[in-house]
Amino acid sequence: MMIIVLGYLQIGCQSVDDNSSNLSNSSVSINKSDDSQIHFIDTGNSDAILIIKDGKAALIDGGDNDDEKRVVNYLKDQGVKELEYVFATHPHADHIGGLDAVVDSIKVNRLYVSNGDADTKSYRDFIESAANKGLSPSVPLLNSEFKLGNSKLKVLSVANTDDPNNNSIVLSYTNDNDKILLMGDAEADIEKNLNPGDVDLIKIGHHGSHSSSTREFIEKTNPEYAVILVGEDNKYGHPHKETMDLLKEKSIEVHRSDECNDIIFTSTGNGLKVDCKKGSYNSGKNSKYNKNTNYNKEKVVTQETNVSPSVSKEKIESEKQKVKDTVNVDKVYWSAKGKKYHSDPTCSGMKNPIAGTIEQSKRTACSICY
């Protein structure tokens, strides 16, 4: 797939100054240059994850609609003035509901979304805010990497299925020897195709639902820690008993937002430290769920929304179409003597660029245009 390059990159491949700081002096204290912090923000039964490294910040999801002030204030409390990347893992409201406020309030350099969209007010509000800020959301390429200081995020899955959960952008975050897996709401069908190797931590998929975290997947990733972002006494019964029994059997240390609120891990580059106590293996109190039903799939309905005069409905639909147009366009560019593939054939002054797939290129991603 060929991503739509964001507006400020369309004129060429200008790198961001790695020495500049996007955090104010009131940001969280990081003692060592190798340290990064991974904040699992407590937004109830929804996801919002902030990663800070070397003065750079990235946000993965933004909570639900009623979490938007909470997420924005949390970012500001950490001194975040600018986000290098925002990833909306998939269009369900419990992942993108608060992102319109984030985009409205904090500078975002690059905005990435999953394949597919949703005809919901939450998704339209998000797209409208992006359009207002001149951002063009794009679908990242599989295996593309995104530098955050001297650490990186890598796209492990960006599927195109009929199920928004399984279309989740799955990311790995690597800081030297530490590796963290961020699953969005990806389920068993996606897990069986992932082979990330051993990881230190997994953000458990789909809030601890039985539809994710299969035995095979947990065994092949072999995590030391598991984080579950889940609301107390939620109506879905998350986390489900099957998931918690497996984590307990494997002696995986659990940290959960319904017991610890915000969960902050520090990655030293050679091991993880966490600020909250070890969580329980208790399942959700609402046990009246059907094992064969996924209750957390958002009902997609057509809703009318009040569009601001500055952004027409046609503009919003145009932005949504741009995202759709990135599907199944698996094309990158490289030069015969170059060692990198590029999203932009003009990047680095390439002469006679060769077009093809990532696999055909047999190269690694350019750190400037990815």
Image (tube, helix red, strand yellow):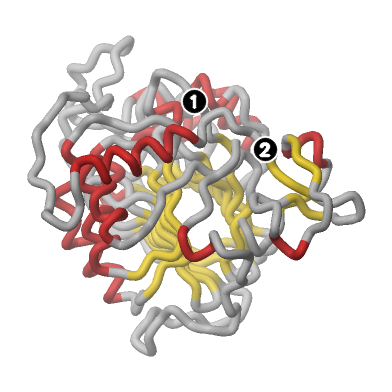
Which residue sits furthest bottom?
25
Left/right of residue 216 with respect to residue 338 in the rendered view = left
Check the picture and name the quadrant holding the C terminus.
bottom right
Rate crowding at label 2 as few (under 14), some (14 to 19) or many (20 or more) other CA atoms within 10 Å: many
Residue sitting at the far right: 337
Asked whether residue 38 appears in the rendered view, the answer is no
Residue at the spot of label 2 = 331
Is 88 left, or right, of 260 in this rendering? right
Q: Secondary structure at mark 1?
A: loop
Residue at 64%, 34% in the rendered image = 330
Query: Which numbered disc flags the more N-terminal residue, 2 or 1?
Result: 1
Residue drawn at 85 percent across, 55 percent down: 339
In the rendered view, would you say 252 is above or below 290? below
Task: Give the x, y percent position of residue 151.
Answer: 62, 64
Q: Is residue 190 visible?
A: yes
Q: Residue 221 is drawn in which quadrant?
A: top right
Whether residue 223 sits left or right of residue 45 in the image: it is: right
Q: Relative to 147, is 127 on the left or the right?
A: left
Residue 258: x and y in percent read 25, 47
Residue 24: where, in percent of width, then height? 37, 85
x 48%, y 65%: residue: 8
Q: Secondary structure at mark 2?
A: loop
**Closest to the observer: 209 or 111?**
111
Amino acid type at image mark 2: Lys
Please state which of the two labelled residues, at mark 2 or mark 1, is closer to the viewer.
2
What number is the disc on residue 248?
none
The x and y percentages for residue 38 are: 45, 62
Is residue 363 shown above or below 80? above
Residue 211 picture quarter: top left
Instruction: Judge by depth and name the residue closer to the eye, 66 or 287.
Output: 66
| Residue to which mark 1 is pinned | 160
Distance, label 2 to label 1, CA atoms, is: 16 Å
